[in-house]
Image (spheres, rainbow, N blue to C red):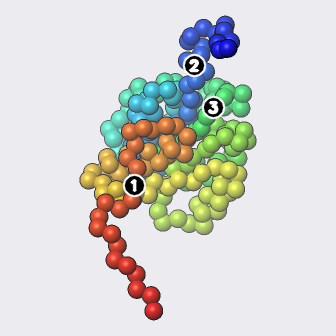
Amino acid sequence: MTTSPAPSNLPVESIRAASQKRIIVAISGASGAVYGVRLLEKLRELGNVRTHLTVSDAGLLNLRQELDMDHAQVAALADVVHQVRDIGAAIASGSFQCDGMVVAPCSMRTLAAVAHGLADNLITRAADVMLKERRRLILMVRETPLNLAHLRNMTSVTEMGGIIFPPVPSFYHRPQTLADMVDHTVSRVIDLLDLPQPEAARWEGPQTSPLPELKTN
Ligand SMILES: Cc1cc2nc3c(=O)[nH]c(=O)nc-3n(C[C@H](O)[C@H](O)[C@H](O)COP(=O)(O)O)c2cc1C
């Protein structure tokens, strides 16, 4: 005997919306605005992700400085855009169901505010919510060198369950361009969001000749 699936009263649109992942992308004022931009572009390419974007004032400054982009241009890459001062926005509440948040890039100021639970703007409030709801929070922290406050704040966020993800490039995949480097890093962030990336390049062992055998005495 075969059984058919139980009929659903949900309209097709609701079923589609329910299977869509919701990801918050925040751009703060550290160098590396390209990470936020590329993350939004890649999430859109994945097709089943609804992005919520918020950008700090310093983030806007760096978008202009580093990429010649204004707020409208970055907003066009997201599905929903929230003003950073709109503390009443949906993403400020734990009742807003959300699958993950990435601050890309994350300044030391925003890191400090998250580490100390300040919730003083929409980015730090949404991050605070992610931590209290035990949801995935990724901070692409960028500064160098690091002082003790930076290191302690990273430890605090890690202890609270957040992921500190400095956008440090790797070279084993032999990047040819800056875009290759950025894409590889962003791809690793998307992995941490548990989103499938069938097209992502992955390490499958060395492509060069095998290493010589190590001599032991
Ligand atoms: C061109 C430029 C580059 C900056 N780069 C960094 C950086 O890499 N890391 C950092 O923590 N702050 C950096 N800052 C400083 C932050 O923008 C500043 O601390 C700001 O208050 C952060 O605010 P926000 O966290 O609300 O975005 C930079 C500022 C400018 C103007």
Q: Amino acid at mark 2?
A: Ala
The residue indicated by pointer 3 is 98
The residue indicated by pointer 2 is 17
Residue for point 50% across, 55% down: 166
Q: Which of pointers 3 and 2 indicates the residue nearer the eye?
A: 2
* Residue 20, image x, y percentages: 55, 25
Q: Secondary structure at mark 3?
A: loop
Q: Extreme bottom residue here?
A: 217
Q: What is the number of the mark on residue 204?
A: 1
* Residue 68, image x, y percentages: 32, 38
Examine the rendered structure and indicate whether residue 114 appears above or below residue 24. Answer: below
Q: Earlier in the sequence, mark 2 or mark 1?
A: 2
Q: Report the Cα–Cα distance between label 2 and label 1.
A: 35 Å
Q: Report the Cα–Cα distance between label 3 and label 1.
A: 32 Å
Q: Amino acid at mark 3?
A: Cys
Residue for point 45% across, 92% down: 217
Q: Amino acid at mark 1?
A: Glu
Q: Earlier in the sequence, mark 3 or mark 1?
A: 3
- Circle 2 residues within 10 Å: few <14, some 14–19, many ≥20: few
Q: Secondary structure at mark 1?
A: loop
- Circle 1 residues within 10 Å: few <14, some 14–19, many ≥20: few
Does residue 61 appear in this view? no
In the rendered image, the quadrant that contains the N terminus is top right
* Residue 118, image x, y percentages: 69, 45
Residue for point 65% across, 53% down: 157
Q: Nearer the viewer, residue 206 or 135?
A: 206
Q: Report the Cα–Cα distance between label 3 and label 2.
A: 13 Å
